[in-house]
Image (cartoon, helix red, strand yellow):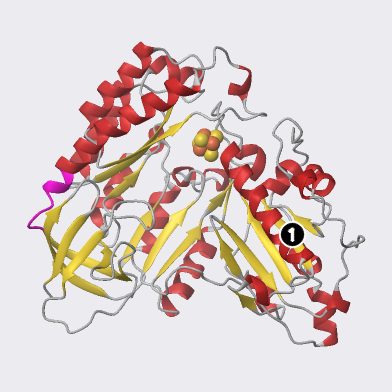
Amino acid sequence: MGMLDRAGARLTAAVDEADVLVVNTCSFIDSAKQESVDTILEMVRHKAAGTAKRVIVAGCLVERYRDEIQRNIPEVDAVVGTGELDAILAAAGLAAVQSNASPFPILAQTGRQESQLIERAPSAVNTHSRPEGNLREQQGRYDRAEWAGAISALPNYLYDDATPRLLTTPRSSAYIKIAEGCDHPCGFCIIPQLRGKFRSRRFASVVAEAEQLVRQGVREITLIGQDTTCYGEDLGMKDGLADLLDALARIEGLKWLRFLYAYPNKVTTKLLETMARHETIAKYLDVPLQHASASVLKRMKRGGSGEIFLKMLEKARRIVPDLVVRTTFIVGFPGETAEEFAELEQFVREARLDWMGAFSYSDEEGSAAFRLEPKVPRRTIEARRKQLMKLQQRISAEKQAKWIGRRMPLLVEGVSEESDLLWQGRTLLHAPEIDGKVLINDFGPHEMLVPGSFYECEITESHHYDVVARIVA
Ligand code: SF4
C-alpha cells in the first residue's frame, strides 16, 4: 500500500469507485484458500460489470497456486507473490501512469483479505492483457483436487525502514514485522514453503521504523513474525529479541510494546527478564504449543511435552509476575488417540492459561503430515475441539474474575462492536484483535472519551472472555 501510495495511487475502501482491485490472499489452510478464491471471484464480478478494469491477486495464494489462478480464473490480470512486492506497481500499471503524470486513486477491505483498489488511467496498463468478457465463473471455483499447487522458488523479500508504508490500524497502534519466513519443520505447516527461509530484519532498521512510527503518533507497537523468538539468529545474535525489546522499550513516547508468537523452547531467561524489567513491555506471552502429548508433538516434528511446557510456564510466571499467557492447540493431528487427547486436556487443566485457541487439524497438501495416517475423522476432531474450548472457557472465566478491582491503563478503541451503549478498549494484557475486550460502561470524570487515547480504568465485572470497566482517570 505504501508503494502504491508513493507511486501516486489513491486508495479507497469503496470497491465500486476503483479501477484496479487488488486481492491480498492467504493460503495457510483450506478454508483460507476457499475464502481467498471467493473474494477473487467477487472482484472479478466487479470487473465483468465494468466498474473495475483490472484485478490483481497478491499474497500467499500466488506463491502456492500461481499457475492455477491464471489457468482457472483467466479474468485475473496479474499475480504478485510474497517475494515480489515491487511488482505491484507494474501490475497496477502505475509506472506508466506516473510517467504520464496522470491522477490516481484507491483501496477496500473484504473479509480477512484486504482488497486494495487502484483507480488508474486505462491506457496505462502495461502488464499482460487478455480478451475481456469471458467470465466463466464455474471455472474459477476452487476445487481442491484441481488446485494441487506447486511451490517454485522460495521468496526472500524483506522490507526495511525505507520501504514506504501505509497503516491500516488505528492511529495509535502499529505492527512491525521483524522477521520473515521460518526454519522450523512443523509437520502440519506449509508456511516455510510460502514465506521462505527465516530471515531477520536489521536491528537498526527495526529501531528506526519504530522511532518513525512513534513520531507519527503511534503509542503501541506489536512486533510480529512467524517466530519472533528466533529474531537475530541468522544475523549471529544470541537473545536478539530480548536486545531488540530492550532498545525499543527505551523509545520516548512509546507506551506499549509487545511481541507475538514465541516458540516454546526459545523463551529464554534473558527474554523473560527483559519483559519483567520494562514497564512498557506487555507481561504477555503468546506461545503456540500446538499440543501437549509428547508422542503427538514428536509426530508434529516439534518436540517438547506437557511436562516441559509446564516447567517453562512456571519459570515464566516466576520471572514475570502477573504474566498473561495465550496459546493455540491443534486438535485431531493424524493418529491422535483418545489417550493423547486426554493428555492435552489434562495439560490445559494444569497450565491454567489465560487465553487459548483450539484449531481443527487441516490436512494440507505439501505438508509432511499430509502423508501421515490414520486421519482422525472430522466429527471426532470437531467434538474434541469443542470439548477443549469448553474446558478452557471455564478456566478463562475464573482467571478473568481475578481481574475485578484491578486498576490499569486502558487504550480506548471506540464504540463497542456489540452495542452502541458501550465503548470498548484494551489493556496491555489484551493483544489487538485476538483476546477478549474491555467493555466500558462508565466514562467516570469524562464527558466523552477519545479513541486512540489512554485512560486509567478499574475492572468491575468479568464474563467468559470480556471484562467490564469504568474509567477512573
Ligand atoms: S514455527 Fe510456526 S510458521 Fe514455523 S513451521 Fe512451525 S507452525 Fe509453521
The residue lying at 49 percent from left, 61 percent from top is 176
For the N terminus, give its image quadrant. bottom right
Residue 106 in the image, given as x and y percentages of width and height: 65, 76
Q: Range of the magenta residues?
A: 399-406
Answer above or below: position of 249 versus 151: below
Front residue of 163/101: it is: 101
The quarter of the rendered structure image containing the C terminus is: bottom left
Q: Which residue is mark 1?
A: 44
- Other-residue count near label 1 (Cα within 10 Å), few / some / many at <14 / 14–19 / ≥20: many
Q: Quadrant of residue 449?
A: bottom left
Position above or below: 79 against 162: above
Residue 184 relative to residue 132: left or right: left
Residue 463 in sight here: yes
Look at label 1 and name its amino acid.
Val
**Residue at image coords 45%, 79%:** 216
In the image, taking residue 118 as reference, residue 129 lies left or right, namely right
**Which residue corresponds to the image point at 82% horizontal and 49% vertical from the top-left?**
70
